[in-house]
Structure formats: structure tokens, C-alpha cells
Image (cartoon, grey):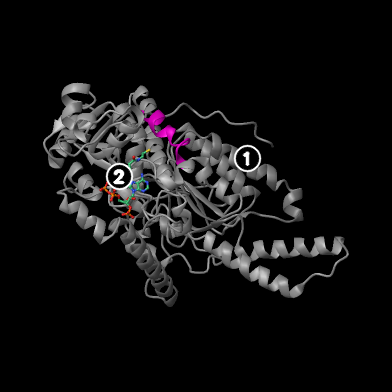
Amino acid sequence: MTVVSSRLDPSGPEYGSRREAMLAKLADLDAEHAKAVAGGGPKYVERHRGRGKLLARERIELLVDPDSPFLELSPLAAWGTDFPVGASVVTGIGVIEGVECVITANDPTVRGGSSNPWTLRKTLRAADIALQNRMPFVNLVESGGADLPTQKEIFIPGGRIFRDLTRLSAAGIPTIALVFGNSTAGGAYVPGMSDYVVMVREQAKVFLGGPPLVKMATGEESDDESLGGAEMHARTSGLADYLAADEHDALRLGRRIVRRLDWHKAGRPPGPATEPLLDEDELLGIVPEDLKIPFDPREVIARVVDGSDFDEFKPLYGASLVTGWASVHGHPVGILANARGVLFGEEAEKAAQFIQLANQSRTPLVFLQNTTGYMVGKDYEQGGIIKQGAMMINAVSNSTVPHITIVMGASYGAGNYGMCGRAYDPRFLFSWPSAKSAVMGPAQLAGVLSIVGRAAAEARGQAYDEEADVAMRQMVEAQIEAESLPFFLSGRLYDDGVIDPRDTRTVLGICLSAVGNAPAAEPAGYGVFRM
Ligand code: COA
């Protein structure tokens, strides 16, 4: 065992203030999560219950195995937009009859469960997760279809939902629709494209056009039941494979369907696991409020990995990036973690080598981000920092082992790319409440704009307006700061959720187990490395 020795002093003032700052951020996070859970608010929740229906999260709870975890994804979707937090759909990973599935559930208390642009992104992300990790995909359907006022944002790209369903099926990944209510127009293709369809008697309504539209189109008089009721689909059209007596029955049938899939995971089973020797609770007191102050990521690793056991690779070289081997809940991982923020050439080379080693042994990689980007300056440019950073980005881009990224602190500049940011398709990406991400820090960005503006004024032979410059800087700094915060970024689906640092080990464990549904990918072929 190579147990990490900790230098953290949980009785010291530094730890105390960091912990307090993190707890304050977590309280804010809880308040935002509560908005998602509240759905459309008391009026619509009561109306829904009054109709004898279960809420979206209650449906999920009854679908998954008792006392099993449900890893909800992107609960803050649509944060900071005109749409309610959560984006009127719940998505996540849950275990049904021992099978890890991707589950989505429309929230009918939010604008009739209709899909706005953020609902669409969240739904597409869920389908991507099912495809990449080969997990059965279960949709709990009750939706008013497209959010009509924003149809221009969703109608055309939204077609992908139905394409994804049949592509999942073609890839041998089962798709299941449990229809609890409305599933009209385009939405009718959710059951239409699914492998298995359950409909709830006297509740499911699945038609291309409802009675008013049919009347308009053909003059035909019809009613909901004969056009798209569960009985009709089970007995006449054949779109429903199972007729459920009520919602509980539909969930029972859904569980039976998954049970009969005889689903087997294709990846390596995990080995034995031991808890970290150091206290996970202490993860609250590691990240400084001011991200300019560095912190040692080994303190994080020691509280996340099995037995706090970490075999560091190349510890004496490129010390600003920590690399090494460990396991999490018995799943072997390679870890890359920023130590002092800036990435130099040595760190980039070390990362590229380490990523190749992980690919050689088919070991998933975990990226722990706290980076201000690659080093700038004459010496570094002349030393080839672009080539070196490109080498790391090449390795990350073409690596075929699963990647999971946790943004602990800063994630600025190309450091976001080299450390497997969202654009590099990690299988999962979560942020801590302390995370911040932008093209560069707010002060630097405002300063750059100021220098550029000043030079442009000089080139035109004009005097630079210093007063306006101060105002511009303040405004830009505030804007960039707000846009770099985790709620904002999570709202735009740039991560899969903001998590409590204390949950990092659990979340990583669920994700590593989920990625184990898929077989190991083909070995990586890299782009040309510039040497
Ligand atoms: N787009 C935007 N808003 C929608 C919506 C949609 N597709 N569907 C429902 N809403 C809104 C309603 O306007 C209502 O808003 P309000 O409470 O502020 O007035 C709220 O969501 C709840 O709708 P309501 O009709 O009261 O709920 P319900 O549970 O009784 O019925 C539906 C839900 C989905 C059956 C019904 O709203 C409906 O038929 N919607 C249109 C369905 C459709 O044809 N969609 C086109 C798909 S392409």
C-alpha cells in the first residue's frame, strides 16, 4: 500500500474558513435543487396529485430497486434562463432489477411537462449516456410536447430524440417507454420508437393529432380515448405492448420488462474495495475560497480512493500535475490532478505519457481540474508550449478509455481542454460548488479588453476614455465572474451536475460502475504528435 500522508490540519483556522465557505455554497446549492424538486410549484403539484397521479420523482423512486441510489443528472438545467430550474424533466442513473439504466421522467407539473430548449438538451444528453455506456434507456412519459412559444429552438433539432431511440435499439440497447399521460404529436414517437411500450389505462393519450386538430384537418369527430387511449393502443393499434391498470402497475410492468432483458455488463467487474483511511467529510475544507491560492490535490485523492492508496507516477517531474494509479469502489483508475494551477511543458508531456499508459492497460481516467491554463510568456512560447499543450490535448482527444472529470476549482483557458472539459466528451463531468470556468479569469479578461481598446484608440490617433475604461472593466469583470460560476454553467448543461465534494467517491463509484456496462473500446490511435 502507498497510503497518501495528509498535511491537512482540520483543527486549523485555514481549514475552518474553507469549510465554512464551502458549506455556505452548499446551502445555496440545496436551495437551487429544491426549486427543481418543487417542479411547477404547489398549485400544479396539488392539481396533479388531485388527479390521482404520482410526481416524476415518485415514479422513479417506485421504479428503481428499494434503497438503491439514483444519481440525478443536471438538476440545475435551465438555471439562469427564462425556464424553471430543472427544465421540466428528471434524468439520471438508477438500478432496476439489478440493472443500471438511464431513466428520464417528464415533470408534468411544469408547463404540462412540455419540452423547452433546455429540456431537449437534457434529454439528448441522457440518450448519449445510454449509448456511450450501453445502458438500457427507460422513459417515463407525460408531456405536452414542444414548448410551443420556443418551438423554433426545438422542433428541428428535437428530431434527434426519436433518431436516438432507434439507434440505441439498433445498437442492441433496449429502450422502454412507460406512458402515464399525454404523449402527443412528435411526442407520440417516444413510444413509437421504443422497443417496449406500457400505457396506463384511462391516462395515456398517444396520438399524432388530438380531437381539435383532427376536426380541423379532416372534419372527423373523435374523442381522446378512441384516438389515442391506452385500451385502444393495447387492443386495436398494437402500439402498446402492455396495458397497465394504474401507475403502480405500469412501474411494476417496467421492472418486469427490465428483469426479462437478461442484461449483462460487458466491462470488467470491480475488485474488492476498502473505504478511504481519511475522512471524506474533510473534503469540505480543502479548496480555498480564492482560487489563486493553490491546494494539494493529493488531499482530495486521499479522501476519495480505496484505502487512500495512491501510486503516484513520475512524482518528481512536472510537479504541477499529479498523476497516478488508484481504485474507487474497486474500479481501477488513473488520476490526473492539477496541483499548482498552471500547466507547463513538462506537465503536458507527463499527461500525454500517462494517458497512453492508461490506454495500454485499458484503465479509465479521472481528471481532477484546478487549472488556470498553459503557461504563457516568451520563454515558454520559445520552448514550444503550444506543441506541448497540443500533445496533451491530442492524447486526451484520442484516448478511448472512459474519462470522468471533476471540476474542483479553476478551469480556465486551454487547461479546460487538456484536462478533459465538456468538449472532450468525458463520459461524465461534475463540478464542485467551488468550481469556476471561463476562457480566462475575469480580471485578466477585462484587462485584455482594456489593453486592446487602448491600443486601438492610439492607432486611430484618439484619446482613450479612462473613465469609460474603469466602468467597462467593472462591468465585464462582474459579467465574466457570473458566467463562470457552477450554477450558471450547470444551467447550460456544461456539466452533469454540481455535487457536494463529500459525495465525490459515491458519484465516481456510480459512474465507474455505469461505464462498465460497455465493453472496453478499441485501443486509441492518436493524431500526429508534434515533437
Ligand atoms: N407549450 C407551452 N406551454 C404549454 C404546453 C406546450 N406544449 N402545454 C401546456 N402548456 C402550459 C399551459 O399553457 C398551462 O399554462 P398556464 O397554467 O400558465 O395556463 C400549463 O402548461 C399547464 O397546462 P394545462 O393544459 O393546464 O395542463 P393539463 O395537465 O390539464 O394538460 C396537456 C396538459 C399537455 C394535456 C395540455 O396542456 C395540452 O394539450 N397541451 C398541448 C399539447 C400539444 O398539442 N402539444 C404540441 C406538441 S408538438
Question: Ligand 1 near label 1 (Cβ, under 8 Å)?
Answer: no
Q: Examine the rendered structure and indicate whether residue 381 appears above or below residue 134.
A: below
Q: Name the amino acid type tagged 1.
A: Met
Say which quarter of the image contains residue 443: bottom right
Q: Is residue 351 magenta?
A: no
Q: Examine the rendered structure and indicate whether residue 32 appears above or below residue 351.
A: below
Q: Nearer the viewer, residue 158 or 329?
A: 158
- Where's the C terminus, which quadrant? top right
Residue occupying the point 18% across, 32% down: 230
Residue 15, how many percent across, how many down? 42, 72
Does residue 258 appear left or right of residue 485 in this picture? left
Q: Which one is in front in this view, the residue at disc 2 or the one at disc 1?
A: 2
Residue bearing mark 2: 106
Say which quarter of the image contains residue 478: bottom right
Q: Name the amino acid type tagged 2.
A: Asn
Comes first in the chain, label 2 or label 1: 2
Residue occupying the point 45% across, 74% down: 14
User: In this picture, which residue range is highlighted in magenta?
Assistant: 154-165
The local secondary structure at tag 2 comes to strand
Residue occupying the point 32% across, 43% down: 144
Q: Examine the rendered structure and indicate whether residue 109 appears above or below residue 224.
A: below
The local secondary structure at tag 1 comes to helix
Residue 504, how many percent across, how many down? 36, 54
Residue bearing mark 1: 391
Residue 457, how many percent across, how many down? 82, 64
Residue 61, how many percent across, how many down? 20, 47
Magenta stretch, overall SS: helix
Say whether marks 2 and 1 touch (CB < 8 Å): no
Does residue 413 appear left or right of residue 509 in this picture? right
Q: Nearer the viewer, residue 309 or 387?
A: 387
Q: Residues within 10 Å of mark 1 (few under 14, many from 20)?
A: many
